[in-house]
Image (tube, helix red, strand yellow):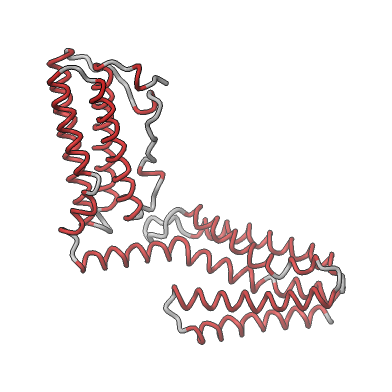
Amino acid sequence: MRRFDDLDQREVLALAISLEEEHSRIYADYAAGLSADYPASAKIFSELGNEENEHRRSLIELFQRKFGEHIPLIRRHDVSGLVRHDPIWMIRPLGIEKVRRQAEEIEEETRKFYEAALKRASDAEIRKLIGDLIVAESQHIGVAQHIADIELTNEARVNEAQTSRRSFILQYVQPGLTGLIDGSISTLAPIFAAAFATHNTWQTFLVGIAASVGAGISMAFAEALSDDGQISGRGSPWLRGSVTGVMTAIGGLGHTLPYLIPDFRTATTVAIVVVFAELWIIAGIRSKFMDTKFWRAALEVVVGGLIVFAVGILIGNA
C-alpha cells in the first residue's frame, strides 16, 4: 500500500476521483435497496449519489486540464489510512439507521481526506476545487439527518419504524423464539426421563447435551430449508437457521447444565427452577414482540411445558 504522503498532486486527484465514484455508487446502491420499504430515505441517498457524481465530474475536468486524459487507477485499498466500507450485499437486510450512520462516516472521512490533500496542494486551481469540496463534504456530514427532518413526514417515520421492527421480528425474534421454545420444551421429556430413570447426574447431563445439540442442528436445517426469504421477506435462510439452531441449543442447555452438580436432588431442583425461568422468559418475549398478553402467553407456554415435563417424569419412573 502507498502512504498518502508519498502521493503527488496527480495521484491525489486520481484517488479523489476514485473515492467520489465509489461513494456515488454506494449511495445509489443504498437508494435501490431502500426504495421498496423506505422510499423517503431512498430519495435522500439518491440525491447524495447525484452530488457525489457531480464532484467526480469536476475533479475529472480539472485533472484533464492539468495532467491530460489518462487517469491512473488508484483506489482506497491502494493507500493506507482509508477505511473499507462494506458493500451493500454484505449488510442486508438494510437497517435504515445503520445506513445513515455509515453515510455520515463516509462524508467525515472524505472531508478529512480533502483537508489533508489541501495541505499538500500547491496549484491554485487545485486548491480552489479542493477547498470547495471540503465545504461540500462538511455540509454532507449531517445531510442525511437534515434532509430527513425536511422530507420525512411523521407518517413516513412511523412507516419506516414499523417496517424496521417487522424485519427485525421476522429475521431474528421469530426464528430465535421458535428455537428457544423448541429447545426449552422438547428437551424436557428426554432429560427428565433420563434423570428419573437413572438417578445419575452425569448420564443425565450427557443425554441433555445430546438432546440439546441434536435439536439445535435439526432446527437450524429445518428453518434454513423452509423458506428462502425472497417472498416472505424473512431474510437470509442461513442467518435465520443459525439463530434458530443456537437458541434451540441454549434452550436445552439451560436445564441440562444443572446436572453437572453431583447431588441428584440438588441438580434436579435447580433444573426445575431453570425450566420455570425459561418458560417465563419465553412468555415475556412473546408478550413484547408478538402482541400477546403476558398472562395468556405465560399460560400457553407454561401449560405446554408442564405437559412435556410430566411426560418425561412418567416415562422415567416407568
Quadrant for the C terminus, please. Answer: bottom right
Q: With 27 as the anchor, is 204 left or right in this view?
A: right
Q: Identify the residue shown where x is 60% and y is 77%.
A: 279
Is residue 201 toward the left or the right of residue 257 in the image?
right
The answer to which image quadrant residue 183 occupies is: bottom right
Above or below residue 197? Residue 90 is: above
Quadrant in the picture for residue 24: top left
Image quadrant where residue 124 sits: top left
Query: Is 60 drawn above or below residue 243 in the view shown?
Result: above
Q: Position of residue 68 (x, y in %)?
A: 17, 12
Say how many tags the image has: 0
What residue lies at 63% left-to-right and 57% top-to-bottom?
217
| Residue 196 coordinates in the image, percent (x, y) | 83, 77
Closer to the camera, 263 or 188? 263
x%, y% of residue 309? Answer: 71, 80
Q: Is residue 289 above or below residue 211?
A: below
Residue at (55, 55) in percent of width and height: 242
| Near-viewer residue (266 or 25) | 266
Give how far across and how far down residue 60 sits, in percent.
17, 23
Which quadrant does the N terminus fall into?
Answer: top left
Q: In the displayed structure, would residue 198 be above or below residue 13? A: below
Left or right: 297, with 87 as reference point: right
Instruction: Identify the residue at the far front of this view.
Output: 119
